[in-house]
Amino acid sequence: MRRYWFLSLSVLCFAAANPARAYMAYISNEKGNTVSVIDTDKWAVTATIKVGQRPRGIEFTRDGKFVMVAVGDDDTIQMIDTKTQQIVDTLPSGPDPELFAEDAAGKILYVANENDNTVTVIDMEKRTRLGSIQVGVEPEGMTVSPDGKTLICTSETTNMAHFIDTAKREVVASVLVDSRPRFAEFKHDGSELWVSSEIGGTVSIIDPVKHMVTSKVNFSIPGLRSEAIQAVGLGITKDDKTVFVALGPANRVAVVDGRTHQVTKYLLVGQRVWHMAFTPDEKYLLATNGISNDVSVIDVAAQKVIKTIQVGELPWGVTISP
């Protein structure tokens, strides 16, 4: 009996010394002009932060101290201090910022400016604008290659993925994809670039060296018209074996084999699923649902939706603490 008591006490002490890590997820609510904060331990909204008009793109800074949110109708990026949950600074983003991407060091930020067809380059340490890069019409999707040498910007109306040399800050190649490309993401090994096309309803897989589309992922859901299946957000697991694709008004997240490029499963989520983000341990994937005003929590290993969390009005983007 005494031995059992001793072991129980040891377990309790170990648990107290090694508490489970709770990540914080920040959700941009486009119509509500707020950011909802979700505690991933409680799976509940713990704070609502008032921000500028039409918040969309949202990301943590590399050091985890701030959350950046693009408030498009205010033509700026606001910075939220994660300790105080207050807006403490802004960045000179250019007109109508939508999505943005950081370099690996967190020193340079690249911002898609939808209204003037440019990418604004920002010095994160000095909070100053370094210049701009001309791209196609209505730029949106932004990502940096794993080696840091290439920036990708998708242009919705030009229907292209632009390859930008980060050293020269100029477009070196443009690849035609299907209609209205919204999001882009590299595999972690840099071997492929995946670009979603909303109106085209496909995901184009691009060889980043040859600058050519090598294959496409197509989607088919019984009972749904093809025009209701609109590929938007992407999430690629760290081992590059599985890709999750948000399918907008289809209210599904597709599970795609990263090697064969074949759809293996469809997960039913909320209405008009938009963007997604993994928890750093990759146990969960959070997906924003714009019309039902909630977030679906997906168990990554089980490939199953386990919870729905109500947030603000028209949730759009999501970022999770590093």
Image (tube, grey):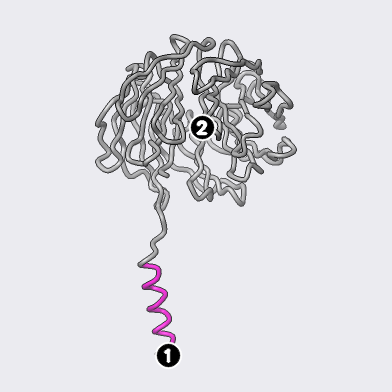
* 238 or 277: nearer the viewer: 238
- Helix, strand, or loop for circle 2? strand
Residue 267: image tag: none
Whole-percent x and y of residue 242?
A: 65, 42
Q: Residues within 10 Å of mark 2 (few under 14, many from 20)?
A: many
Residue at the image position 62 percent from the left and 18 percent from the top: 199
- Amino acid tagged 1: Met
Residue extending furthest toward the bottom: 1
Q: Quadrant of the N terminus?
A: bottom left
* Residue at x 27% of width, y 43% of height: 83
Circle 1 Cα neighbour tier, 10 Å, few/some/many (<14 / 14–19 / ≥20): few
Residue at image location 36% in from the left, 43% down from the top: 45
Highlighted range, magenta: 1-16
- Distance (Cα) linking label 1 and label 2: 53 Å
Residue 5 lies in magenta, yes or no?
Answer: yes
Q: Position of residue 110 (x, y in %)?
A: 44, 23
Reading the image, the residue beneath label 1 is 1
Is residue 201 or residue 283 the one in the foreground?
Answer: 283
Q: What residue sits right under mark 2 in the picture?
A: 275
Name the N-terminal-most of marks 1 and 2. Answer: 1
Q: Main secondary structure of the magenta part?
A: helix
Asked if residue 206 shows in the view, the reply is: no
Q: Is residue 197 visible?
A: yes
Q: How many marks?
A: 2
Q: Is residue 207 magenta?
A: no
Instruction: Determine which quarter of the picture holds residue 265.
Output: top right
Q: Position of residue 289 (x, y in %)?
A: 49, 33
